Amino acid sequence: MKTPKIGLFGLGCVGQGFYDLSQLQTPSAVPGKIVVKDPIKKRNADVSLLSFDKDEVLADEDTNLIVEVIDNSADAYSIVKTALSAGKNVVTANKKMIVENLPELMALQEKTGAALLYEAGVCASIPILRTIDSYFSQEPISTIRGLCNGTSNYILSAIYNRGWDYAVALAEAQRLGFAESDPTLDVESYDALYKLIILTLHGFGVLLKPDDVFNYGISNIQAPDIKFAKASDYKIRQVAQAYKTAAGKISLWVTPQFVSPSDPLYHVENEFNGITIDAEHSGTQFFSGRGAGSYPTGAAVLSDVHASLAGFKYRYEKYKSNNGLIPTDTTEIEVYLRTPNEKIFEQISLRNAESHGRNFVTGSIRLAELKRLKPLLEKEKVFLASLPFRQEHSGTAMAGKEELKKVSV
């Protein structure tokens, strides 16, 4: 086996975590070169390893493993594509880049034999992707549900448990390093959406684009929503989920969701992530771990590095089997809507609508209709949450309204 030489691209939060942890491990995981942009910025790393020329490191024939942990998805794709094209294995944590370029990246792996691993881009410290791709490769999965974004879960936990408003909770998440200065990808649920698309590829064998899936963020949450949740002993989580319908299709969405104490996700607090998998033979399994932070994510990168050095590759068994699953947006979900402008309800058609006060209602609505209404809902700062998940054979994902307590807000 060729002696490994690692080229690390990026020394930010995740890159620093990986670098620090690599010093504690076997020498094979220590980067031989670290590519950074700013030559002036002080770095907490061996300065002799620093490089400012990405092309030089990519062209180095002795560098046979690239670790890419930069923020910019376009630059990340250029690095990853160049490395794979040269037959170099790659480890990345950039889920946005993965989702935007999945077909090309899969084709490059097939063509060159190089491996691309991206566990750290899904649920940080939880080894969920390798578990799904390998352990569940031959077992049908009916549902994947999870808290895939540690930033949003920290914010929602702080609002619920400490009584903070959204702005205060967000500021604290930023201070702790859980949230970026621009938190849009996290709080508007795009980060969780990208992760769900990756999980769906490996768990169901279905390759989707972000526009195929309805997603909605947490930024409009206010005290009345917490009051409504507590009245029924619910908590609010940002949940990404995919499930196989009775008609043999797959339905996906990412929204804030009320979860009950019987749901494992109810007990996942702060920056932790949690994933439940329902499989045909194994039943329900639950995984939880830290979903944000330098060392949890850096540890996942380090694990992928060791897996890559050992010859591990994703198998993509379910995708290759062409099982015929197709996405559907005809699924109805039960939702809660609250808005400062009650006239907005005149433009929203809910089945079995029930008013719980002047400014908020519950009812069922198809995912396709929610996609159409999304610009209006965001413009009017509507807080939307799905009600506790229960998979129905009719293709409806809902909660029985008898579970809701009456509350005036």
Image (cartoon, rainbow, N blue to C red):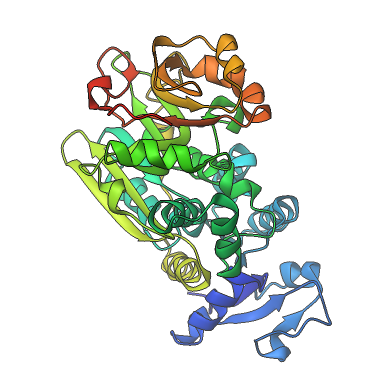
- In this rendering, is residue 350 above or below 102? above
Say which residue appears at 34% left-offset and 30% top-offset. Answer: 407
Would you say residue 93 is visible in this rendering? no
Image location (x, y in percent) of residue 381: 62, 32
Image location (x, y in percent) of residue 154: 46, 57
Q: Quadrant of the C terminus?
A: top left
Would you say residue 48 is visible in this rendering? yes
User: Left of 119 or right of it: where is 249?
Assistant: left
The quarter holding residue 58 reads bottom right
Residue closer to the observer: 16 or 388: 388
Say which residue appears at 44% left-offset and 37% top-offset. Answer: 225
Residue closer to the observer: 318 or 240: 240
Residue closer to the observer: 372 or 3: 372
Residue closer to the observer: 258 or 317: 258
The quarter holding residue 203 reads top left
Image location (x, y in percent) of residue 229: 35, 38
Say which residue appears at 49% left-offset and 54% top-offset. Answer: 155
- In this rendering, is residue 3 above or below 150? below
- In this rendering, is residue 8 above or below 283? below
Say which residue appears at 23% left-offset and 37% top-offset. Answer: 279
The quarter holding residue 398 reads top left
Image location (x, y in percent) of residue 168: 57, 58
How many numbered marks have been drawn onto this rendered protein structure?
A: 0
